[in-house]
Image (cartoon, grey):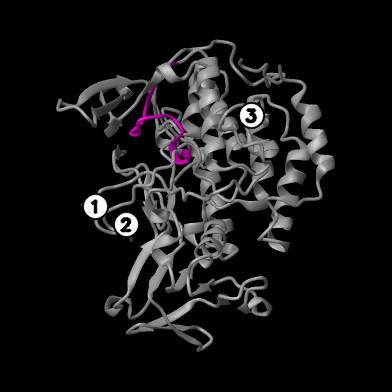
């Protein structure tokens, strides 16, 4: 059953004249599903386009991998899942779920009641969400958007084609387009001097599924984020040696990893000479395989904005608050670009903001004011020495961002227990990366969450 929404008080600057729109949502993952719900709640008509054969987006697992393990060949067979078989969430379910649809433990065959469940449990949660809010019937599965761009009269022209049928593109007109296509498809690869003569194998983590292919081999894995931590430990169960190259590793952490006889931490790779990998501290290792856990590039191959939105070193812009391009607002918007965040609640807030602006319930600043705000943001990032590729990286600033959008929408601020739970998990993850999913000390926050969930029937 759909759950009762939290009380929402409308800010005084909102218009009382609600105008329904016809909106195309691209992607049926977590962002696309909650966007569709918020749009429908606002009274808009919605069509969701999804390449896959089911809803869930990046939470749909497949054992299939791409024909090019590095993901560089533009003609490769593209697989849209980056999940590995052993993946469990790195956030507890209480703070991970949508705010008015708690990610509770459920009974039933195949359900995972652990606090940090498997990817399969997250997919079931999203499927439950889609069913309970009657979103499934809005989704065109196995349908690829090949073009989205401005048409006549300020409307948006969307061309799509069914993936499994020999037919012409469907050409349609919409009032607005919301892009929710995720950012875990196009791999970013580390630049390594000498790699062109590397005789061994390479892979991006996008194509990692299980550790068996690495049996008895010497592996160099590049990266220090969540997937690198997980995959290095997964591979270490079968590999001869695993050497992790992390550009942000602290000097006192270098060397053998505690609790592992076959895993070492190193600074970043300096170069490759034949089969020998040279690290920046001068140490070397002869390796069989290099695994790149080096993140992804934003990619919108279908989008045509005549230069109003570009991707420059992974900065999608210019975007007001990571959502609206001033020149095309509110008719084009993006949900889910920020990373290193608590994603589902942020998607929920962003999509309600979008829904409200489209209906005239919420007013955006003028194009000039939005552009000025963006320029100030870019200038502050430059002053702090933040690379362009980190434009959408948030971390601790996410709470101010979330609460600012909540204020625009008339929502209450993000719950304090949710913030503290996120921070406690991050701290616990750093302290005990092997066991944080099964040992924690924030049961008081779990109790607060459960009391909060009692507000939803």
Looking at the image, the residue that sits furthest to the top is 17
Label 1 Cα crowd, 10 Å radius (few <14 / some 14-19 / many 20+):
few
Which residue lies under the disc numbered 2? 71
Label 2 Cα crowd, 10 Å radius (few <14 / some 14-19 / many 20+):
many
Label 2 residue SS: loop
Is mark 1 in CB contact (under 8 Å) with mark 2? yes
Q: Residue at the spot x=81%, y=28% of the render?
A: 451
Which residue lies under the disc numbered 1? 76
Residue 407 is at least partly visible in this image: yes
Is mark 1 in CB contact (under 8 Å) with mark 3? no
Measure the C-alpha gap from mark 1 to mark 3.
43 Å
Mark count: 3
Which residue lies under the disc numbered 3? 408
How far across and down, in percent of the image, does residue 200 sit?
Answer: 32, 75
Specify the label residue 421 is tagged with.
none
> Residue 117 colored magenta?
no
> Could you tell which of marks 1 and 2 lies nearer the N-terminus?
2
> Could you tell which of marks 3 and 2 lies nearer the N-terminus?
2
Please state which of residues 282 and 258 is positioned toward the viewer in this rendering: 258
**Quarter of the rendering containing residue 7:** top right
Q: As displayed, is residue 62 above or below residue 292?
A: above
> Could you tell which of marks 1 and 3 lies nearer the N-terminus?
1
Please state which of residues 42 and 14 is positioned toward the viewer in this rendering: 42
Q: As displayed, is residue 325 above or below residue 311?
A: above
């Amino acid at each position: 059953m759909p759950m009762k929404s939290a009380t929402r008080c409308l800010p005084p600057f909102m218009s009382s004249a609600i105008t329904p729109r016809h909106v195309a949502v691209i992607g049926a993952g977590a962002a696309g599903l909650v966007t569709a719900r918020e749009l429908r709640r606002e009274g808009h008509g919605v069509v969701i386009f999804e390449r896959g054969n089911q809803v869930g987006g990046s939470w749909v697992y497949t054992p299939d991998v791409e024909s090019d393990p590095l993901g560089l060949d533009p003609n490769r067979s593209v697989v849209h899942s980056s999940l590995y078989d052993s993946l469990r969430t790195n956030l507890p379910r209480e703070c991970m779920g949508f705010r008015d649809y708690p990610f509770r433990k459920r009974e039933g065959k195949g359900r995972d009641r652990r606090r940090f469940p498997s990817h399969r449990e997250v997919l079931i949660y999203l499927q439950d969400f889609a069913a309970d809010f009657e979103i499934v019937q809005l989704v065109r599965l196995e349908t690829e958007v090949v073009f989205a761009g401005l048409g006549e009269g300020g409307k948006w022209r969307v061309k799509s084609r069914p993936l499994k049928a020999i037919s012409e593109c469907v050409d349609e007109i919409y009032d607005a387009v919301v892009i929710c296509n995720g950012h875990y498809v196009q791999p970013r690869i580390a630049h390594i001097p000498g790699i062109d003569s590397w005789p061994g194998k390479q892979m991006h983590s996008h194509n990692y599924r299980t550790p068996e292919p690495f049996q008895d081999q010497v592996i160099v894995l590049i990266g220090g984020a969540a997937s690198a931590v997980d995959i290095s430990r997964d591979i270490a169960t079968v590999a001869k040696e695993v050497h992790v190259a992390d550009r942000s590793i602290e000097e006192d952490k270098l060397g053998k990893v505690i609790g592992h006889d076959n895993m070492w931490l190193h600074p970043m790779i300096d170069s490759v000479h034949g089969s020998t990998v040279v690290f920046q501290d001068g140490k070397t290792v002869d390796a069989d395989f290099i695994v790149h856990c080096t993140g992804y590039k934003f990619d919108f191959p279908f989008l045509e904005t005549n230069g109003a939105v570009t991707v420059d070193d992974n900065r999608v812009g210019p975007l007001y608050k990571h959502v609206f391009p001033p020149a095309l607002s509110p008719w084009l918007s993006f949900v889910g670009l920020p990373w290193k965040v608590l994603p589902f609640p942020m998607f929920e807030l962003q999509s309600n903001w979008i829904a409200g602006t489209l209906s005239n319930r919420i007013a955006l600043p003028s194009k000039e004011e939005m552009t000025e705000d963006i320029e100030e943001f870019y200038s502050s990032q430059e002053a702090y020495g933040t690379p362009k590729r980190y434009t959408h990286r948030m971390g601790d600033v996410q709470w101010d961002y979330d609460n600012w959008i909540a204020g625009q929408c008339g929502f209450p601020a993000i719950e304090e227990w949710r913030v503290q739970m996120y921070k406690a998990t991050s701290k616990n993850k750093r302290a005990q990366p092997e066991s944080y999913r099964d040992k924690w000390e924030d049961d008081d926050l779990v109790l607060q969450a459960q009391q909060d969930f009692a507000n939803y029937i």
